[in-house]
């Protein structure tokens, strides 16, 4: 391709490649761009894209990425990002995004993300945890969750909580965790009928959670 003309930007790459073959994903584009220079992380990708136009926010980043494939949910966003860098947790995602914009809080992050799809569960999660103590960053949120076990991602948190009780949302998950009577899962705990043996076997914590959600 270099014999035809230099390709220094992602936009140039896509324009050139579209005339050769269909490129619908960022991964395909980056695979082609490896002949121009190695791109191993999203930060490197964005730096390359900066030559096309400034990208200062996550919203701008996602808008640019949508030219190579639709991204409607946070899960899709993370999946797409993992093709250009190791991003295994939302904390890592947030840290990476801070290189292209001032996103210091989960609220700011969610506000940006809602431009590509509703994320009501995470927002409710943060609101619920505020009743326990101030949580201004996603890192603090994950740290709070780690009090119930070795949990590095929100997905792991939700999976862990679903083995403790019938908890299908992160809001329910955090409500259970912030209730004083809620037991902390320990290795070897016996789980039955969706509840732990102990203070919560009668479902009191879940009923309390439902009452909180109604007010």
Image (cartoon, helix red, strand yellow):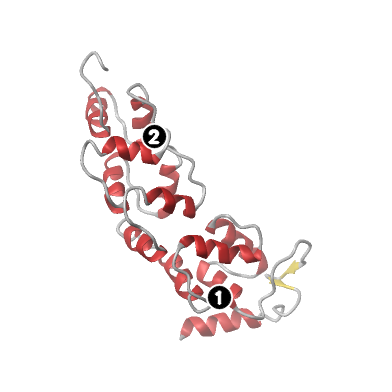
- Disc 2 crowd rating (10 Å Cα; few below 14, some 14-19, many 20+) is some
Where is mark 2, residue-wise?
27
Q: Tell which of 169 and 89 is nearer to you.
A: 89
Q: Tell which of 97 and 78 is nearer to you.
A: 97
Up-down: is 108 above or below 37? below
Q: Which comes before the other along the chain, label 1 or label 2?
A: 2
Which x, y percent locates residue 143? 56, 62
Where is mark 1, residue-wise?
175
**Which disc is residue 1 wearing?**
none
Up-down: is 18 above or below 142? above
Residue at 26% from the left image edge and 17% from the top image edge: 2
Task: Answer left or right for 41 relative to 14.
Answer: right
Q: Secondary structure beneath disc 1?
A: helix
Which x, y percent locates residue 13? 26, 28
3D distance between C-alphas at marks 1 and 2: 38 Å
Q: In which quarter of the image is the N terminus?
A: top left
Which x, y percent locates residue 130? 48, 75
């Amino acid at each position: 391709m270099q014999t035809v003309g230099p390709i220094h930007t992602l936009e140039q790459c896509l324009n050139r490649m579209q005339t050769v073959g269909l490129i619908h994903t960022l991964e395909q584009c980056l695979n082609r761009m490896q002949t121009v220079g190695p791109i191993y992380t999203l930060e490197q990708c964005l730096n390359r894209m900066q030559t096309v136009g400034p990208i200062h926010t996550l919203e701008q980043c996602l808008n640019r990425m949508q030219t190579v494939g639709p991204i409607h949910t946070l899960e899709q966003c993370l999946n797409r990002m993992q093709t250009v860098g190791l991003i295994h947790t939302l904390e890592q995602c947030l840290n990476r995004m801070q290189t292209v914009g001032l996103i210091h809080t989960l609220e700011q992050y969610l506000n940006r993300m809602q431009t590509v799809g509703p994320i009501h569960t995470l927002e409710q999660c943060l609101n619920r945890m505020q009743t326990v103590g101030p949580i201004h960053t996603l890192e603090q949120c994950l740290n709070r969750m780690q009090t119930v076990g070795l949990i590095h991602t929100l997905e792991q948190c939700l999976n862990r909580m679903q083995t403790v009780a019938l908890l299908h949302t992160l809001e329910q998950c955090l409500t259970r965790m912030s209730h004083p009577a809620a037991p902390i899962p320990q290795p070897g705990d016996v789980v039955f009928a969706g509840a732990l043996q102990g203070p919560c076997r009668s479902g009191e914590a879940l009923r309390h959670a439902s009452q909180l959600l109604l007010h």
